[in-house]
Image: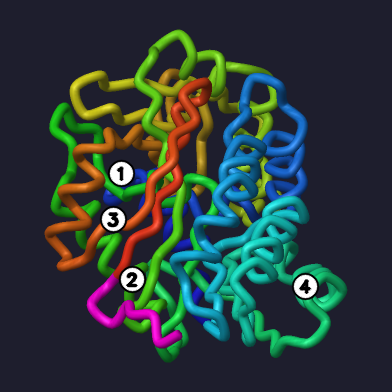
């Protein structure tokens, strides 16, 4: 059986691919560390700010969206995020809830939680990567919801130019989950360097990021990785607003297939800070429209409702 994690790990260390490890950060102990970061770290307010943006937008969503839709929840993650999804579902009167979540740990709790909050609806959960799904998900006209800032994890090397075409392509993939209906998502627009460094250069974020190599060392002992032999040292490129998640080796490591020297740097993922103008241009390029936007100026988090070609209100 193909071991995707091992293949991607080798690609990272041999530098044949970069910034493609984001989906593994939320697996195993990573899921627990993400919950601590998202729900409790004072310096990282995005998940909490996103939930508040959604709550404030509920009357507007109820006004703009038809009742009886299917909701496709993309990478809902932990408990608080799922509760926010349920609040949307209740406000707009959904009849089906489908979740696509890459973390098996998060998937375990979703059905019971949604059932307790929305007891009369049909529920389905798929363990899959929403950007590169193994299973084809077909749905009628629906609301696809991407909470958090997962849209910012674009797989791209370090580059002073923002990857506008990649953002448009990613938005097109997400909109397909709605059957050309509606896409609700949050983006991080913050470009203040001091604020960004506070969010990412703290012990909680470092524990979350370095957990990747600790798990890899345990999973593949024959490789000879030193699990605690990496530190987290992200880099920010101002012109493209790319916050590159970097792990740097702190010790020499004589692995079975390669040698890692102290100071070697590995680009594991990205967190792009997406200017509203860049995002709205990408929306237009895929033939969609922005119908609602709300911005939390304190955190730079923006909530967008995007309508696709099949979006219409049959009321």
Distance from the alpha carbon under mark 1 to that under mark 4: 41 Å
Q: Give the residue at mark 2.
A: 175
Distance from the alpha carbon under mark 4 to that under mark 3: 28 Å
Q: Which mark is residue 33?
A: none
Q: Earlier in the sequence, mark 2 or mark 1?
A: 1
Seen from the viewer's position, the closer of residues 121 and 152 is 121
Task: Answer few, some or many: residues within 10 Å of disc 3's Cα (few below 14, many 20 plus, some between 14 and 19).
Answer: some
Instruction: Left or right? Give the position of 67 relative to 258.
Output: right
The stretch in magenta equals: 308-315
Q: Earlier in the sequence, mark 3 or mark 2?
A: 2
Q: Could you tell me what secondary structure mostly forms the magenta stretch?
A: loop
Distance from the alpha carbon under mark 2 to that under mark 4: 23 Å
Residue that extends furthest to the front in the rendered view of this protein: 315
Residue 314 picture quarter? bottom left
Instruction: Left or right? Give the position of 51 relative to 301.
Output: right
Distance from the alpha carbon under mark 3 to that under mark 1: 38 Å
Helix, strand or loop under label 4: helix
């Amino acid at each position: 059986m193909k071991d995707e994690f091992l293949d991607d790990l080798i690609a990272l260390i041999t530098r044949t691919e970069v910034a493609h490890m984001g989906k593994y950060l939320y697996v195993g102990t990573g899921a627990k560390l993400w919950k601590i970061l998202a729900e409790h770290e004072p310096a990282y307010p995005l998940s909490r700010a996103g939930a508040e943006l959604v709550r404030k937008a509920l009357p507007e969503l109820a006004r703009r969206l038809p009742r009886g839709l299917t909701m496709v929840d993309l990478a809902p993650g932990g408990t608080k995020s799922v509760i926010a999804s349920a609040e949307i579902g209740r406000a707009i009167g959904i009849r089906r809830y489908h979740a696509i979540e890459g973390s098996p740990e998060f998937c375990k709790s979703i059905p019971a939680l949604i059932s307790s909050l929305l007891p009369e609806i049909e529920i389905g959960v798929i363990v899959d990567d929403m950007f590169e799904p193994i299973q084809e998900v077909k749905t009628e006209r629906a609301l696809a919801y991407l909470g958090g800032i997962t849209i910012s994890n674009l797989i791209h090397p370090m580059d002073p130019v923002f990857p506008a075409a990649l953002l448009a392509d990613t938005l097109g993939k997400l909109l397909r989950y709605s059957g050309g209906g509606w896409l609700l998502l949050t983006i991080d627009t913050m470009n203040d360097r001091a604020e960004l460094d506070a969010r990412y250069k703290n012990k909680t974020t470092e524990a979350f990021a370095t957990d990747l190599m600790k798990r890899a060392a345990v999973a593949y002992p024959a490789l000879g990785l030193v699990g605690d032999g990496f530190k987290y040292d992200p880099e920010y490129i101002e012109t493209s607003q790319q916050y590159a998640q970097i792990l740097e080796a702190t010790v020499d490591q004589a692995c079975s297939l390669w040698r890692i020297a102290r100071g070697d740097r590995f680009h594991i993922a990205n967190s792009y800070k997406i200017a509203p103008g860049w995002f709205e241009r990408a929306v237009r390029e895929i033939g969609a429209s922005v119908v609602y936007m709300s911005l939390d100026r304190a955190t730079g988090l923006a909530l967008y409702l995007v309508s696709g070609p099949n979006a219409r209100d049959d009321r």
